Amino acid sequence: MMNKTLLASAVALLFAAPTVSAIDLYKDSKTDVNLGGYIGVRAVNTDSETQLVNGSSRINFNFSRQLTHGWHAYSTLEWGFEPFGDTELVYNRDSQFSANNDNVFYSRLAYIGLEHDRYGSLSFGKQWAAWYNVVGGTDNAYVWGGAAGGAYSLDGSGGIDGTGRADKAIQYSNSFGRFSFTLQTQLQQNTIDVSAFDSDNVNSTLEYDDTYGASITYAITDDLSISAGANRGSFTGFNAAANQRIDTDDEIYGASVTWGNVSDVGWYFSANYNKNKFHDSDINGHLMPSAYGIETMISYMFDSGLQTYALFNGLISDEDYTYPEDDGSRSPLVTESKQQEFILGAAFIWDPTILAYIEAQIDDSKYKVEGMPETTGEDAVAVGIRYTF
């Protein structure tokens, strides 16, 4: 049987980068504590500007402790951080200048679990979701990618609805022969104040409560596997301006196929497809009532450490949909949303600690609101370097 702890830890590390390393902080016959993460920086050029930005830098601590009767405990704490500064200049009402710094650190993962080779793994906290087991195989670009698989919905991390880095999640994972599976629920109550969007400033709220998800993977061969999964949650609330109760399900389900290992020499391929309902949003942040997503990735790793890759992200609304105007009035606007991105890239990996990459995005997206000009996507190019420790 698979080691479930290694499987759970590998999902985040394997899909994040072709190479990983860690620094042992403490190790004896029962306990292992190590430090990992990377510092990244990239220059991004779009049609309108060029910026030097953070390259998703992060730091993590990983703990493992052998227990009795074949059990062991494990935990991961990971924070994203802004190593290059993100300072905004503020001119206050006393005619004084001051600096306003956003949080340098923010939580990415924080979970603890127990694992047994026979009885499986049970974990608690903010962790990679069951749904990510289905779509994570295409989330391997260094800058863009993973935009149509539904993993990073709502808050940008998939934390609220439990499809990316799920908040307050409980997971059970196990494997039998070539089958492995994960069951997940979130125990949470998120209240969203939407009064600011009402023209008359009356109180309107949304509540997003517990969610449920599951995934299953079958390894056909050592190189070829297929996965399927689903995730479901519900919005409830009241729109005071329209005197209307809100009761909507957030659903996503789909399947994927993966060949090879993205960090190994040779070919790698992964593709996934999903159908979703009130799960992903368009470029203006409006939830689409019904949409489908397609992601594909193909990559080749040379012996020299050169990796070339290509991806496609497609998130398309099934049909025209409506939403209230931004001023709070009730007249709906008919909307069409088609997000299509082609990504080409190359990376050179000197050793397990240093890599550099160049990545281009050709954005063929189209967004149309009735009575307004069509909005199209913006192409971009990024060059970056990453130090992994």
Image (spheres, helix red, strand yellow):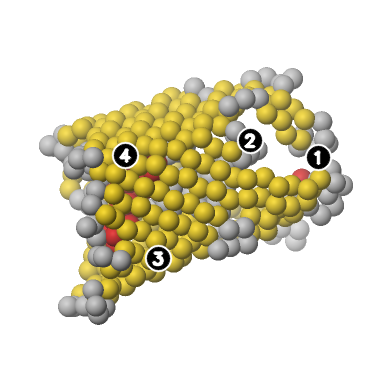
Residue with the most extreme front position: 176
Mark 3 element type: strand
Q: Residue 310 is drawn in which quadrant? A: top left
Mark before the other along the chain sequence, 3 or 2:
3
Disc 3 to disc 2: CB gap under 8 Å: no
| Picture residue at 70% right of the left edge, 52% below the top | 236
Label 2, label 4: how many angstroms apart (C-alpha)? Answer: 28 Å
Q: Residue 210 is drawn in which quadrant? A: bottom right
Mark 1 element type: loop
Label 3, label 2: how many angstroms apart (C-alpha)? Answer: 32 Å
Q: Residue 249 is drawn in which quadrant? A: top right
Q: Which residue is mark 3?
A: 123
Mark before the other along the chain sequence, 3 or 4:
3
Report the front residue among 267 and 37. 267
| Picture residue at 32% right of the left edge, 36% below the top | 257
Assess disc 4: are there few (<14), some (14-19) or many (≥20) residues with their C-alpha within 10 Å of its C-alpha.
some
Q: In the picture provided, is 333 more to the left or to the right than 50?
A: right
Type of the residue with mark 4: Ile
Type of the residue with mark 1: Gly
Q: Which mark is residue 328?
A: 1
Q: Which residue is mark 4?
A: 226
Residue with the most extreme left position: 303
Label 1, label 4: how many angstroms apart (C-alpha)? Answer: 45 Å
Label 2, label 1: how many angstroms apart (C-alpha)? Answer: 19 Å
Mark before the other along the chain sequence, 2 or 1:
2
Type of the residue with mark 2: Pro
Q: Which residue is mark 2?
A: 289
Mark before the other along the chain sequence, 1 or 4:
4
Residue with the most extreme bottom position: 68
Assess disc 2: are there few (<14), some (14-19) or many (≥20) residues with their C-alpha within 10 Å of its C-alpha.
many
Assess disc 3: are there few (<14), some (14-19) or many (≥20) residues with their C-alpha within 10 Å of its C-alpha.
many
On the question of residue 34 being in view, the answer is yes
